[in-house]
Amino acid sequence: MGLEIRGVTKSFVSTTAVDNLTFRLDVPSVVGFLGPNGAGKTTTMRMITGFLAPTMGEILVDGEKAGIDNTSLKSKIGYLPESNPLYTELEVHEYLKFAAELSGLDPARIGERLKFVVERCGLKDVLYDPIYRLSKGYRQRVGLAQAIIHDPQILILDEPTSGLDPNQVVGIRDLISELAKEKFVILSTHILSEVQALCDRVLIINKGKLVLDATIDQLQHSETAVLDVSVKTGMGAEEVADVFMKGLAPAGCSGKKSGGIVSLRIRAKDTEEFRERVFELCVSRGYKLLEMSNSASDLENVFRELTLGTNEAGQE
């Protein structure tokens, strides 16, 4: 079992939402699928689940080509979309049984799976309540339950802990970790601490393109560090970032300006030597150096750099 995305592109009239995306999942695990709003995450997930067809490329599930017409693969995939559409007039147990039947689950297993999802998603107290009466948190748990009730091998979760209280979040995280022992879980979320707590691997896309594919361990033990620099100058943030890129050739540099102060985030391998070079460059260019400090090369920093763009600077 596995999932492979081969050169997938999805275009809508004049917009390319996903651009030549390629990656594969071979080992059961939790993969964080990240990107800013509009990066192409939801479009990609909809193509994997068969709701959308790629304009180019192909998606293989267990070696079989996925697509809108391939209904046989639907039983192998569970999907919790961010919008979490539910049939709110149904009672919780009715909806979950309906979802199990739609997914092609063997009728003999429906009772067993219903009991499992009710227990693991904390739905016992609302099992016979109509969904329209439920809080947002309970609705989210019902959505997760329908995604896993048919025991799929690939689970795609878009903001699964949205609307849950801290205790519920812990419970859902534990469930995801348990499922990932034998399933392929793609987790899309804007909560980066959740990714660091749950995921084995991170994929980041920006403007439809894959810009990072790395394990959490690789990110945490990266030789590249981050240096935060603030300078006072009459120049714009983009001009200053360009000076640093050309003069110091760092791994990346992004900046923003507030008032007369330009704040830069620079990636460099040897920060001690690099700090000296930054100081010398500021002196030679007449910049007033206000602050220079090391920042951990954590997921948040990596995400910001990759999605803001190398040497991309903005005015605030």
Image (spheres, grey):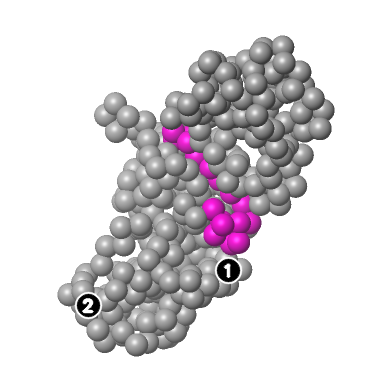
Q: Nearer the viewer, mark 1 or mark 2?
A: 2
Picture layout, residue 84 above or below residue 19: below
What residue is drawn where x is 32% and y is 46%? Answer: 52
Q: Is residue 223 magenta?
A: no
Q: Residue 57 at x, y = what percent?
A: 44, 36
Q: Which residues are magenta?
A: 192-210
Which residue carries the number 2 mark? 133
Task: Determine whether, in the image, residue 258 is placed left or right of residue 251.
Answer: left
Q: Residue at x 41, y 86 (%)?
A: 115
Question: Which amino acid type is marked by label 2?
Answer: Arg
Is residue 257 depicted above or below 154 in this figure?
A: above
Position of 298 with respect to 259 (left or right) is: right
Q: Earlier in the sequence, mark 1 or mark 2?
A: 2
Q: Is residue 65 left or right of residue 250?
A: left
Q: Is residue 186 above or below residue 224?
A: below
Q: Viewer-proximal residue, 73 or 48?
A: 48
Q: Name which residue type carries label 1.
A: Ser
x and y, in percent, of residue 217 in the image: 71, 52
| Residue 173 visible, this angle | yes
SS under mark 2: helix
Which residue does the numbered mark 1 point to in the structure image?
177
Q: Is residue 214 left or right of residue 72?
A: right
Q: What residue appears at the point 68 percent right and 42 percent down from the top-left corner?
A: 295
Q: Is residue 195 magenta?
A: yes
- Using the numbered discs, state the Cα–Cα distance from disc 1 to disc 2 in whole angstroms: 30 Å
From the top left corner, tell me how far across and down residue 11 is, in percent.
Answer: 34, 32
Quarter of the image with the N terminus is bottom right
